[in-house]
Image (tube, rainbow, N blue to C red):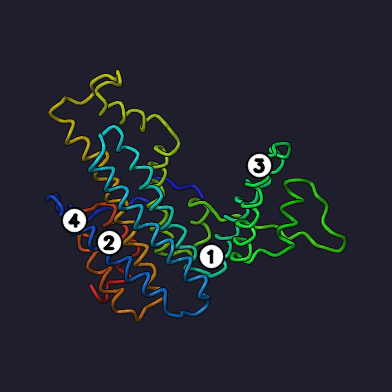
Amino acid sequence: MKITVASCAFKQATDIDVEKVDSVELDSLAKTCISRAIDALKAPTARYSEKDRFHMSRIFSDMKMTHHTIRFLLEKVEPSESVVSLVLARLQLEALYALCLMFEEACYVTRYLQDNWRKIYVAQLFRRVECAGIERYDEYERFSEVWVRALRDDCGITEEQQRTVDLEELGTALPLGMLAVPIEGFPTPGRIIGKIPRGGKRKMLMRLYPEYQHLSSFAHGLAEASLLRGMFDQHSGWPQIVTSGKKEETFHKLVVGPAFSTSYLGIVQSCTELTTLYPNDLELFAGVTAAWDYLTRGHLIGKAVWGLRTKDLLGAVV
């Protein structure tokens, strides 16, 4: 799906409040959202098994840990080194995309888990083939075998699926009478968009995709990542594009603000999407409603997400 400025830009009707935000308060609101999301997922809901709900709750827990790591990097390490926080902010958007798809159909939770198992199993096959002549590897292989088998059972991988991976990766023939059952890959954010029905949810993910692509630059080692690191590293040899007096302001605009706000937005919108599975959970609704106050007042991308999607989910209670 081709995503262009013309196809997904959101025209802002009003400006944002540019007053300094209380990041500690926002951290607390994000933490509350995640806690209530995890609590909500403990209750049964149509179409999702207890295992499905557990693994979705783990994604929320992971988002919480990622947010804490971003905060640590922004506060405790040198500016040039904390640019890596933008890589972690990308993870928060990836989690949002994944959860949005999982909330469509429970089969995508299974696909998410099984795709992960396949990658782990293929890595094991590589080690097994490459290290077959190394005696020291035998002990590690025994440990790895137990771990991969336990994970296989937890993910519901069948004998047919495992043997199909052996066929695909090693060329090992299937047992007589067995049919190949490939393990489907879990789609990347760009492919997830096309699997979401037309409407506000898809429009919201389309608008966030350019932000995701921008943050991907920092994960892929592209020029902007190097530029920012050089800009804030006095020993880098980069030309002094920004004067010393403006460096702190520039750092906040290009690194601190995007990393923190993207992480916060990813968490809050993920928890908001969960209300589609738990429409009667008042605690969850209250948590995300309070968290959206900053995003609707002080964050342009947050206002776009609100206008495209979230107001239809929370508008009745905001």
Q: Residues within 10 Å of mark 3 (few under 14, many from 20)?
A: few
Mark 2 Cα shell of 10 Å, populated few (<14), some (14-19), many (≥20): many
Who comes first in sequence, dot 4 or dot 2?
Answer: 4
> Of the residues tagged 1 and 3, which is closer to the observer?
3
Which amino acid type corresponds to the residue marked 4 in the rendered image? Val
| Labelled disc at residue 297 | none
Picture quadrant where residue 75 is located: top left
The residues bearing labels 4 and 1 have C-alpha atoms spaced at a distance of 33 Å
Q: What kind of residue is marked 1?
A: Val
The mark nearer the N terminus, 2 or 1, is: 2
Which amino acid type is shown beneath numbered disc 3? Tyr
Q: Which residue is mark 3?
A: 137
Tell me the residue that label 1 is attached to.
109
The mark lying in front, picked from 4 and 3, is: 3
- Give me the disc on residue 24: 4
Asked which quadrant contains residue 201, the reply is bottom left
Residue at left 53%, top 69%?
105
Q: Earlier in the sequence, mark 4 or mark 1?
A: 4
| Horizontal side, residue 214 vs residue 290: left or right | right
Question: Gap in Å between the C-alphas at discs 1 and 3?
Answer: 33 Å
Local secondary structure at mark 1: helix
Q: For mark 3, give the secondary structure.
A: helix
Residue at mark 4 to residue at mark 2: CA–CA distance: 10 Å
Give the percent coordinates (x, y) of residue 94. Answer: 43, 53
Query: Marks 2 and 1, how far apart in space?
Result: 24 Å
Q: Secondary structure at mark 2?
A: helix
What residue is shown with label 2? 30
